[in-house]
Image (cartoon, rainbow, N blue to C red):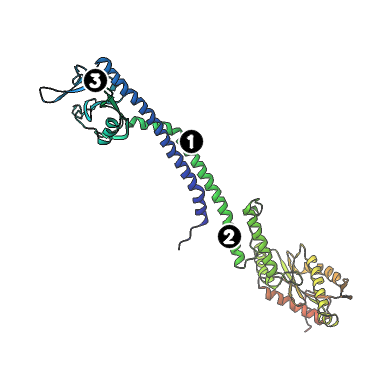
Amino acid sequence: MKKTGIYKRLLYVAVFPVLVFGLLITIFSYIRFKKSIYTEARTDMRDVAQSMLLAYDIAYPGDFSLVKNEEETYDLYKGDVNIVEDYSIIDRLSQRTGTQLSILYLNTRVHTTFKSASGNRLNGLLANSDTVDKVLYNQKEAFYEDIDVLGTEYIVLYVPIYSSNGSVLGIAEVAKETASLKKNVIRAVWPILALSIPGMILAAFIAFETTKHITDVLRAIQVFLNHVATGNLQAELNTKYLRREDELGEISRSSVLMQKSIRASVETDPLTGLFNRRYLLSAVPKITERAKETGEPYCVAICDIDFFKKVNDTYGHNCGDDVLKEVAKTLKQFMERKGFASRWGGEEFVLIFTKFTASEAFSSLDTLMETIRNMTIHSEGNDIRVTLTIGLADGDDGDINHIVEKADEKLYYGKEHGRNQVVYEIPKKDD
C-alpha cells in the first residue's frame, strides 16, 4: 500500500477547508444575491403587469372578451373596442420596462410582444397546466425562473386578470430576460469574490508555509531519530529546533534527551561513569579522520592501576570498586579541555588527547601521576593509596586497537621496569 506523507496530509487538512469555505461563501453569496435580485425583479414585474392592465382600463373601459369574427377566428375586445391590431400600449410599455408582455384569455396567449424570428407575434400559444391551476383556478401569482423562449432564458410572472364581477377571465404575463439579472448578480457578488479569492490564496499560502515549516521540523527529527536507531549516537539535531517554544520544540528536546539516555546506557561504563570501549571504538576513527583533514595531532595513553589485584584481595571488591571510581573521577577531571577518558576494561583506562602530540601529553601526565600518588581513597574504614603506570603513543591512521597496542607495549615495559611511571619511548637495547 502506498504511504501518504504527513506533509501531504497536513497540507490537505490545512488548505482544503480554506478553499471549501471560500467556495461555500461564494456559492452562498451568489444564491442570496440571486434570490434578492430575482425577488426585486418579481416585484417590479408585478408593477408592470398592473400598469399594463391599468393602461388598458383607462384607454378602453370594460372587461376583456373574445369575439368570433367573420374569418372564423377570434378578436380580443376591451369593452367595446377590438384591440387585436392595436399593440401601441403593450409595445410602448414593453420598450420602457425592458420586458416582454402578453395577455392570455383563459389559457391562450391572444395579445403579446413576443415575436418569432420572422417577426410574427406568438399569439395562440397555450399556458401550461401548472400556470392555469395557480392563476385561473386558484387566483394566485405564478413565478418561474429560467424559462426558455425561442432560445432565450426569461423569468416569467403570471398574474390573474379579473372581470368586473370578480371572476378570473385571463392571465397577464410579464417576462424579463435573465441575462441582465445574472449580470446584476455577478456584479453584486464580484466584490465578495475580489476579497475572498485573495483571502483564500493568502490563507492557503499561510497554511502551505506553516505546514511546510512543521513538516521540515518533523523530517529533521525523523532523520535524527533514524541515525540514533541505526547506532549513530553522535548524531546532532539543529539547535534551532531545540529552541522552539512549542510542541515541536518539546519533541526535539525529548529526542535529544532520549539520545543522551541511550548514549549513557550504551557508551558509558556504569561503574565509573567514563566512556566505555564501545564509545572509544566509534570515536577514535572520527578523530583520526579529522586529524587527516586538519593536520592536528592526537595521542593515546593507556593507564593501569598498579597492583590492583592486591587491592581486591586485601580490602575486598567493594573497596576495589571505590578505587576504580575515584581514579576514574580524577582521570575525567584531568582530561577536561584535553580530550576524554574511557574505561578499557578491568583496571585499565584509555586517555585520548586531541590536539596533543605524545611528547606534549607526556609532560602533562606528570601532574596526573603526582595527583594519583598523593590521593588517599577512603572506603569501608580503609585508607587506600594507589599508583598508575601509563603507556603513551602518538595517534596514526590505524584503528584504535592498533594504537592501543602500541601504547600497551610501553605500558608493559613500564610494568616490567618499576611501575608508577609514564613510558613514551622504550629504550633501545645495546647491540
Q: Secondary structure at mark 2?
A: helix
Please tell me the numbered disc located at residue 222.
Answer: 2
- Of the residues tagged 2 and 3, which is closer to the observer? 3
Q: CA distance from mark 1 to mark 3?
A: 55 Å
Could you say where residue 111 lies in the image, as x and y percent from the top left?
22, 24
Q: Check contact, mark 1 vs mark 2: CB within 8 A.
A: no
Q: Quadrant of the C terminus?
A: bottom right
Q: Nearer the viewer, residue 391 or 160?
A: 160
Q: Nearer the viewer, residue 277 or 155?
A: 155
Q: CA distance from mark 2 to mark 3?
A: 89 Å
Residue 152 seen in the figure? no
Q: Nearer the viewer, residue 296 or 42?
A: 42
| Mark before the other along the chain sequence, 2 or 3 | 3
Q: What residue type is disc 3 on?
A: Asp
| Mark before the other along the chain sequence, 1 or 2 | 1
Q: Check contact, mark 2 vs mark 3: CB within 8 A.
A: no
Pointer 1 residue: 195
Please tell me the numbered disc located at residue 63.
Answer: 3
On screen, residue 324 versus residue 261, left or right, reads right
Q: What residue type is disc 2 on?
A: Gln
Residue 408 seen in the figure? yes
Q: Relative to 331, is 28 above or below?
A: above
